[in-house]
Image (cartoon, grey):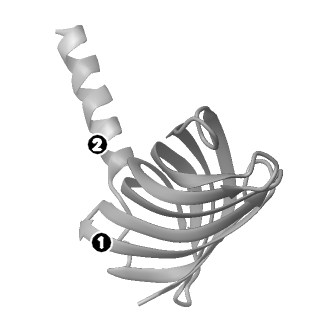
Amino acid sequence: MRKIFLFCIVVLGAASLSHAQRISPNALGLRIGDSDGFGAEVSYQRLLKSNTRLELDLGWRDSNHVDAVKLTALHQWVWRLDGNFNWFAGAGGGLGSYDNERLDKSGTFLFLAGDIGLEYNFDIPLVLSLDMRPELGFNDYYRDDLDLDIALGIRFQF
């Protein structure tokens, strides 16, 4: 009986913690940062359900003699932490093109991506986020390894 009671308490506690704060139907802004250079992305988020969303990012990267343009799509789950703070995690992937000046190579690449981060929803239609996006790329000359992309997001909600 004690095990059943303890199990019910754990399940009810997890359910109350996983209840998401109402997130805006749309958000548009910038995601700035990169692991080994500078990167900027135009970022759009679209609400799918009460606690899930789609994020689309179109961005430019500049690092170590390589310029790249990439498109990323992620499905994210959002959980309420406390007050206006949320945390989120997601998975997806993307594609891009690169130009490597040092190797005199250019081409396209595909990548798989994960995403985990924190965000703060202000009382005005503004949200700030900090996230880490591990990306596993597939190409012989540009992205054939794991990249940990860390960025600050600034988005207007509507």
Quarter of the view holding residue 15: top left
Between residue 61 and residue 118, name the one nearer to us: 61
Question: From this viewpoint, is residue 123 visible?
Answer: yes
50 up-or-down from 42: above or below:
above
Crowdedness near tag 2: few (<14), some (14–19) or many (≥20) residues, C-alpha within 10 Å: few
Q: Amino acid at mark 2?
A: Ala
109 up-or-down from 128: above or below:
above
Quarter of the view holding residue 135: top right
Q: Position of residue 153 (x, y in %)?
A: 63, 69
Q: Amino acid at mark 1?
A: Leu
Quarter of the view holding residue 146: top right
In percent of the image, x 47 and y 44: which residue is there? 113
In percent of the image, x 32 and y 27: which residue is there? 10
Q: Which residue is identified by label 1? A: 47
Between residue 151 and residue 41, name the one nearer to us: 41
Quadrant of the rendering where the N terminus is positioned: top left
- Whether tag 2 and tag 1 are in contact, CB under 8 A, the answer is no
Query: What element does badge 2 sit on?
Result: helix
The image's mark for residue 15 is 2
Q: Position of residue 104 (x, y in %)?
A: 74, 51
In percent of the image, x 34 and y 37: which residue is there? 13
Between residue 32 and residue 3, name the one nearer to us: 32
Question: From this viewpoint, is residue 80 visible?
Answer: no
Q: Position of residue 20 (x, y in %)?
A: 35, 59
In percent of the image, x 76 and y 45: which residue is there? 103
78 up-or-down from 8: above or below:
below
Query: What element does badge 1 sit on?
Result: strand
Q: Position of residue 109 (x, y in %)?
A: 49, 49
51 up-or-down from 23: above or below:
above
CA distance separating discs 2 and 1: 21 Å
35 horizontally vs 3: left or right = right
121 horizontally vs 151: left or right = left
